[in-house]
Image: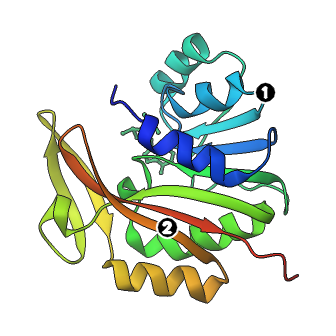
Amino acid sequence: MFDMEEVLHPFYKCLGIKKGKLLDLGCGAGEPFARFFIDRGWKVTGVDFSKGMLELASTYVPEMETIQADMCEVEFESNQFEAITVIYSLFHVSSKEHATLFDKFYRWLRPKGKALFTYATKEYTGSDEFDGYKEFMKQKLYYSHKSPDKLYADLENIGFNIESTDYRNIGNEIFLWVTVSKPVTE
Ligand SMILES: C[S@@+](CC[C@H](N)C(=O)[O-])C[C@H]1O[C@@H](n2cnc3c(N)ncnc32)[C@H](O)[C@@H]1O
């Protein structure tokens, strides 16, 4: 597992609250994000379509509520979560679905709530926009992304404030880490 301290702490700090509800989409085994928030008294709901990953999560992070589902298919009530994380998983979903998903994140977050997600860019796939398969650890995996400009336009059209966009090299892989917040204007 990669050392995620440089991402976890700034995101936790920028939330500006001690406790709340986190939705972790593509949660995998629940480490390190769900574990980090649960250890600080947060309630975490993890969504992943892999039964095997959720079985691991039940060992590593038994306190996490888990839902086995495609993140594009799940539904939650509005204004439910103080935070949403989508770590190393959104780029496995077709970029055609991203704006619809961001729209849902906006609805599910409480005002002032924040979402953090990892976005693939040409630094990872070699193309401004990508939709296809790449080898990762000897496995062919599906990746999809738009250009950062199109991504930012989608987020702003929905109403998000873009708080930070950082290219980070973690474990020798460069991804764009994006934090957005839902304004208090409703
Ligand atoms: C690279 S792992 C990352 C897991 C975890 N977020 C982490 O940071 O370690 C990607 C995870 O996303 C899940 N995933 C990919 N596409 C998904 C989808 N459409 N719906 C739900 N889970 C998905 C996979 O099953 C896998 O557990």
Element carrying mark 1: loop
Q: Which residue is mark 1?
A: 41
Front-lying residue, 23 or 33: 33
Left or right of 26, for residue 38: right
Front one among 123 and 27:
123
Instruction: Name the spot of residue 171 as percent of width and height, x first.
Output: 23, 37
Q: Residue at x 72, y 34 (%)?
A: 44
Q: Is residue 124 visible?
A: yes
Residue 174 horizontal/vertical position (percent): 23, 53
Give how far across and how far down residue 74 sits, in percent. 67, 52
Q: Residue furthest top?
A: 59
Nearer-the-camera pick, 36 or 66: 36
Q: Quadrant of residue 90?
A: bottom left
Q: Tell me which label, 2 or 1, sits earlier in the chain.
A: 1
Residue ID at (71%, 37%) = 45
Query: In the rendered view of the protein, which quadrant contains the N terminus?
Result: top left
